[in-house]
Image (tube, rainbow, N blue to C red):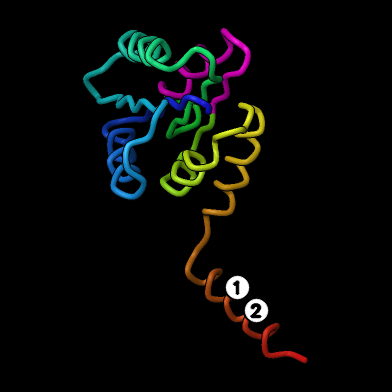
Amino acid sequence: MLGIILSGHGGFASGLERAMKQILGDQPQFVAIDFPETSSTALLTSQMEQAISQLDPQYDIIFLTDLLGGTPFRVASTLAMQQPGREVITGTNLQLLLEMVLDRDGLSSEAFRVQALECGHRGLTSLVDELGRCKEEKAVEEGI
């Protein structure tokens, strides 16, 4: 099982964690770290290092962050590059979090990264696109 550290600006991480717990219940090897306006890069680094020490060292670690180039992403990237078996995924949303928390057993950190990116792309859609997809599927079902 991979360890997951979720971080983002404001209450991003704790908000996603609450939503995840409402849907899936508590999850092992999971830490959420908010980065409020009153925080600093040094404090976030310390919090992430502490989170790493809380996770089982036999497992690789995945950092899930909110925004490419933001402080949570940069801190996670620095920590990820210090040891093999660590990955950073950015642009995290609730669908990606839920699917990947459930699918992480048996995945390497690299396989997690690949699958998470596919999940994230699949999860970004619109009502118009989904309605069009439903019409296409129905047309196929009604054909000869």
Q: Foreground: 97 or 71?
A: 97
Residue 82, quarter of picture: top right
In the rendered image, residue 59, in percent from the top left (x then y), is placed at 54, 19
Q: Quadrant of the C terminus?
A: bottom right
Residue 4, quarter of picture: top left
Q: CA distance from mark 2 to mark 1?
A: 5 Å
The residue under the point 66% across, 33% down is: 111
Q: Is residue 11 magenta?
A: no
Q: Which residues are magenta?
A: 71-88
In the rendered image, residue 78, in percent from the top left (x then y), is placed at 52, 12
How busy is the neighbourhood of tag 2: few (under 14 within 10 Å), some, or many (20 plus)? few
Q: Amino acid at mark 1?
A: Arg
Residue 40, quarter of picture: top left
Image vertical order of residue 33 relative to residue 101, above or below: above
The residue under the point 58% across, 40% down is: 116
Mark number for residue 60?
none
In the picture provided, is 121 more to the left or to the right than 144? Answer: left
Image vertical order of residue 81 relative to residue 18, above or below: above
Mark number for residue 133?
1
How busy is the neighbourhood of tag 1: few (under 14 within 10 Å), some, or many (20 plus)? few
Cβ atoms at labels 2 and 1 below 8 Å apart? yes
In the picture provided, is 100 more to the left or to the right than 55? Answer: right
Q: Foreground: 94 or 66?
A: 94
Which residue is labeled 2 in the image? 136
